[in-house]
Image (cartoon, coloured by chain):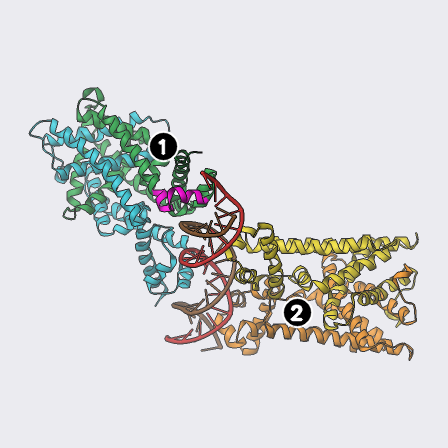
Chain colours: A orange, B yellow, C green, D cyan, E red, F brown
DNA sequence: TATGAATGAGGGTTCATTCAT
DNA sequence: CATGAATGAACCCTCATTCAT
């Protein structure tokens, strides 16, 4: 079997195992066995457990960001539509590749520095993408509407965090389609943001 | 040193270590050493590594939910104000006890069934609290405004997810006060939700 | 509570625990707890785990030897009758104080259930083999000679026990050949058995 | 080194160590070191300490039962002769593989020297008592009947061993009284001994 | 007399990693 | 290209034993 294919196969299995057991909980033994090869091959191809995990991480991050970007790029004429398309792609991706998302996002602590850095990098890439769309969408609303980089980043964090958490909600409501979830989220956030930019501010005293 | 105090001290240290290394990555040895005692004491007082982690989990969950509830209860006349107060308490809590939050929320996989159950329970408690406020807030808007349980749960997930993610944003913007973050989040979400309930729906076609 | 009584109480409990778990399997913690006192008291009175076990051992040995000697001395006019009385005292003692005998003679208990089962199985296999030969041998002696299964099992136990014990004797008499030992044992047991089947019964009164 | 051979080697060493120290007293570390390998190999091949012990147990039990059965089957025309052959094989086996027998039947060894000495002392006291009665009983039979010290000790060992083993039989037959058991044992042994002293000797050829 | 608090040492078990073939 | 055999290091946990009170 050619090297590339073997490598892909190993990483495929590794993503599943890492998602199920977490980084420390996963054992190279189990991954090798499920991949149907011997342990030394894993080390020959991927160097170490950390290298294997990094490869998983990068591949899945690329896939996700790719899906997001692809959908956003082809998603419509306005940034608003592109954001919608990107979020939709995100929810669709997570619905179909739950393991990938878990490996990417739910490994917070317990990781070596190198891994933590890679995780952070992957997250930043997603955030940047979203923040870009947000900023562009706002800019389109007219010269009056301004959003600092900090603000855009804030909104991106809120959006991505909400989206992440909603993957749990989706898992508990199997009937819901990614489209439905995305629509709901856009309604919750985007509409409000528009109003805010128009000057309608919420303040505690208003209560 | 009396037992209660020792116990508290051990749990204090354990929260830090679990937050830094994750459940599997943490070693009882390190916890004992940092607590300035010998390993057998940890086992005498907390039974097992799992027992220790569960104790950490429950204590921090109680603290957080308590902070949220306390602030919400005393926070104002309307659910809207109480939600604001609750979120504010959340951000303040996380700003001050980052480790607690990490232990509570960022341990997704790699956990035994008993622990996973406890984590889920803690999460559900927070969600229920938030969802309750959301539902009450909406109901107050008038008889026309209706929100199904599913919808309230959706909003709660989005809110909590956004809040979680914004703790990262806060960590990267040290100058920001919890109040500022909370205000921004309320603006993003609450205002939009009001509009939506008034009939203004976002749709892809609108783009 | 006076010292002597405390000590007796501790040793009473220790005999039970040692009998149930074996020397290594028993923990001083368990003994102290069952005795209703704290561990330091056990060490104050009995010095060490080994000291505790030795005390148990000696006390039970004295009891058993005492019972045997007492019965033998008062048992009759002839050594034969005294031996009968001594053996009777032995069986009565073991029937009533099984734990004592186990501590004195056996430490096999301290095994997990799975192991204990395997040991029992191995023993049963040997017994069955021997009992089969005994029964067959008797049957050959003619139709008049009958041996119930219970009797055959009894003889098998006696034979195997004797053989086991004689391995100690052999170890202490290196010059003895297996043939010599076997011959002696057959003489002791088989000849007697033949006579008994022919109707010659031993009774205490015969003494 | 091929797997089978390593496995055999480990079990060989384990039998020695288990025989010397008992199950709990034995440490996998020591077994691995004596076998000239590292601990993980022991676990790779034998699964666990319990698995290792069970393997020892079964192998030695098979060997012993096999030796007994083989000898018995080929041992002669009558059951009597076959029993003789079987017992002979047993004594020969134990003489040659003392460790095997200890592992199979005794776990008492795992005791410190001081304890082992005390146990031995207790046993000697009982043996001396019984041997004394036996010798006296024989002497009473008349001047012609002589029993050397060695012979008396032999009989005492056989009697005590039989009595010990019969305590198991008693435990499995709750209805039996100590009197009944003692009578049976006296019949089996004493009557035969009397005949033997009168000159009636059992010999294999007699079979 | 009595104990709560504390520990050094060691045991069973697993894991990431590497040779020799 | 591929693997069976092997291990150093570490981890969770328990135990016999001792102080300070």
Q: Residues within 10 Å of mark 1 (few under 14, many from 20)?
A: some
Q: Nearer the viewer, residue C185 or C25?
A: C25
Residue interval drawn in magenta? C39-53
Q: Nearer the viewer, residue A105 or A46?
A: A105
Res. D195 mark: none
* Res A8 visible: yes
In the displayed orientation, state which residue is furthest to the left.
D144
Q: Position of residue D160 (x, y in %)?
A: 25, 36
Q: Residues within 10 Å of mark 2 (few under 14, many from 20)?
A: many
**Could you tell me which residue is drawn at 74 percent across and 72 percent down?**
B174
Q: Is the magenta region chiefly helix, strand or loop?
A: helix
Q: Is residue B96 magenta?
A: no
Circle 1 marks a residue in which chain? C
State the residue position of label 1.
C97
| Position of residue B18 in the picture relative to residue B133 (left or right) | left
Q: Is residue C46 magenta?
A: yes
Spatial separation of the CA atoms under disc 1 and disc 2: 65 Å
Q: Are marks 1 and 2 in contact (CB under 8 Å)?
A: no
**Could you tell me which residue is drawn at 33 percent across and 42 percent down?**
C54
Q: Position of residue B196 (x, y in %)?
A: 89, 62
Is the residue C86 above or below the residue C54 in the image? above
Q: Nearer the viewer, residue D29 or B158?
A: D29
In the displayed orientation, state which residue is furthest to the bottom.
A143
Q: Nearer the viewer, residue A149 or B155?
A: A149
| Position of residue E18 in the picture relative to residue A92 (left or right) | left
* Res C143 visible: no
Tell me the element at label 2.
helix
State the residue position of label 2.
A104
Tell me the element at label 1.
loop
């Amino acid at each position: 079997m050619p090297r590339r294919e073997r490598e892909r196969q190993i990483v495929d299995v590794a993503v599943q195992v890492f998602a199920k057991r977490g980084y420390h909980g996963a054992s190279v033994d189990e991954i090798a066995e499920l991949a149907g090869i011997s342990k030394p091959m894993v080390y020959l191809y991927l160097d170490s457990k950390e290298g294997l995990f990094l490869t998983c991480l990068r591949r899945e991050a690329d896939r996700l960001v790719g899906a997001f970007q692809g959908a956003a790029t082809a998603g419509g004429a306005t940034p608003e539509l592109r954001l919608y398309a990107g979020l939709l792609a995100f929810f669709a991706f997570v619905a179909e590749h739950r393991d990938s998302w878990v490996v990417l996002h739910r490994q917070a602590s317990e990781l070596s520095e190198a891994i933590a850095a890679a995780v952070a990098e992957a997250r930043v890439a997603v955030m940047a993408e979203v923040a870009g769309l947000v900023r562009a969408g706002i800019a389109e609303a007219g010269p009056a509407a301004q959003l600092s980089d900090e603000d855009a980043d804030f909104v991106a964090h809120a959006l991505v965090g909400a989206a992440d958490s909603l993957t749990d909600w989706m898992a508990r409501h199997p009937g819901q389609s990614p489209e439905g979830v995305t629509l709901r989220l856009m309604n919750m956030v985007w509409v409000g943001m528009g109003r805010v930019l128009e000057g309608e501010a919420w303040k505690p005293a208003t209560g």
